[in-house]
Amino acid sequence: MEGEEGSQQPQLVLANKLFLLRAPDVDDIEKVRLRDEVFAAVKADDMASLYESLADSSVLELDATLLDFMRKRIEEEIKKLDEKIADAEENLGESEVREAHLAKSLYFIRIGDKEKALEQLKVTESKTVAVGQKMDLVFYTLQIGFFLMDFDLISRSLDKAKNLFEEGGDWERKNRLKVYEGLYCMSTRNFKRAADLFLDSISTFTTYELFPYDIFIFYTVLTSIISLDRVSLKEKVVDAPEILAVIGKIPHLSEFLNSLHECQYKSFFIAFSGLTEQIKLDRYLQPHFRYYMREVRTVVYSQFLESYKSVTMEAMASAFGVSVDFIDLELSRFIAAGKLHCKIDKVAGVLETNRPDAKNALYQATIKQGDFLLNRIQKLSRVIAL
């Protein structure tokens, strides 16, 4: 079940096709192709329970004869696996017993039976001694979680993996876990943590079972842009050789990253509009599409305004290649939400920045805390005096 280099886990490939099949932005001709591919994958792996649920939701047409045939094959395969387990327990060693139980676990994962797969993985774990092999079982559980987008299962599995690493564990598995955790963080809108974990894994990436390397770079760049300051972005992303080697293969991504860093805002908006379709059609990013769009615009508007104490609306609109009315509407929303530190002089058509001074804010906070401390000391001295 674990993908070899360049090979994604089959159930995750299927999950992505199911997502696209339900996505409103995918055209009908493409959906016909996707439906055929989903049906072929479900049939090939005897995914009876998934087939039934997809038929109930009208994604696939139900063939009762095929469903019965799948169930019969599942029963026969489980019987064979149980016979192998019994034979191993009677005639072979502990290692062979574990392998027989693992084969049954992987079969349940293959047919998409979550409950039985998790139950069998627990049985397999009870037969497992080595920390590395226990970690592999956690990775299988995480793959089930990502297939179903079960964030509770993923969160518990990540905690379990971290506890296992306290007992030991090799660096290769630790690095793989960072990518799993990064994907979980990105899927739950913790983009800062996701960016940190992805950047730590760039040079050691081996987690091909989750996604190909170019998709990993895509996620790394997208999360980094809204999480890192300009200096860190240059050092860790713009100039990173691992990213430079791949970024050109992903449409619009290089222009998106470099135009932001080089302050080419008109080019940035063009590249940004080209990327929106890819973000919308990504099963991990799509739920956060609107949020991500807002965050990116906050970053780019803040970067532009940082260079000015005041600037005309016309100059800013020209820099971004949009109309003055568009910029006016955009900025008013971000200012009202507290995302941008500036104000609009509508009469003069000017933007005036009022960025908070970090040193001054620290000074004011220190004074406030000092006053609070003095008041407490005075109250305490009165009590002591009594």
Image (spheres, helix red, strand yellow):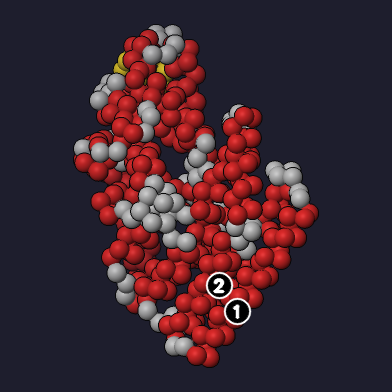
How far across and how far down the image is residue 329, in percent? 49, 19
The mark found on residue 104 in the picture is 2
Would you place residue 89 above or below residue 366 in this image? below
Q: Where is residue 97 drawn, in percent x and y?
A: 49, 83
Quick one: 9 or 286, which is closer to the camera? 9
Q: Position of residue 269 (x, y in %)?
A: 39, 22
Taking 250 as reference, is 15 left or right? Answer: right
Determine contact: label 1, label 2, CB under 8 Å: yes
Kindly report the distance in space between the C-alpha atoms of the residues bearing marks 1 and 2.
8 Å
| Label 1 crowd bin: few (<14), some (14–19), many (20+), radius 10 Å | some
Residue visible at 40% across and 73% down in the picture: 133
**Mark drawn on residue 82:** 1
Of callouts 1 and 2, which one flags the residue occurring earlier in the amino acid sequence? 1
Nearer to the camera, 309 or 31: 31
Spot occupied by residue 279 in the image (x, y as percentages of width and height): 47, 35
Kind of residue sitting beneath label 1: Asp
Give the image quarter of residue 84. Answer: bottom right
Could you tell me which residue is drawn at 59 percent across and 32 percent down? 30
User: What label does residue 316 carry, if any?
Assistant: none
Q: Is residue 7 left or right of residue 206?
A: right
Q: Quadrant of the C terminus?
A: bottom left
Residue visible at 62% across and 52% down? 42
| 332 and 34: which is toward the camera | 34
**Along the line of sight, which residue is nearer the eye, 9 or 370?**
9
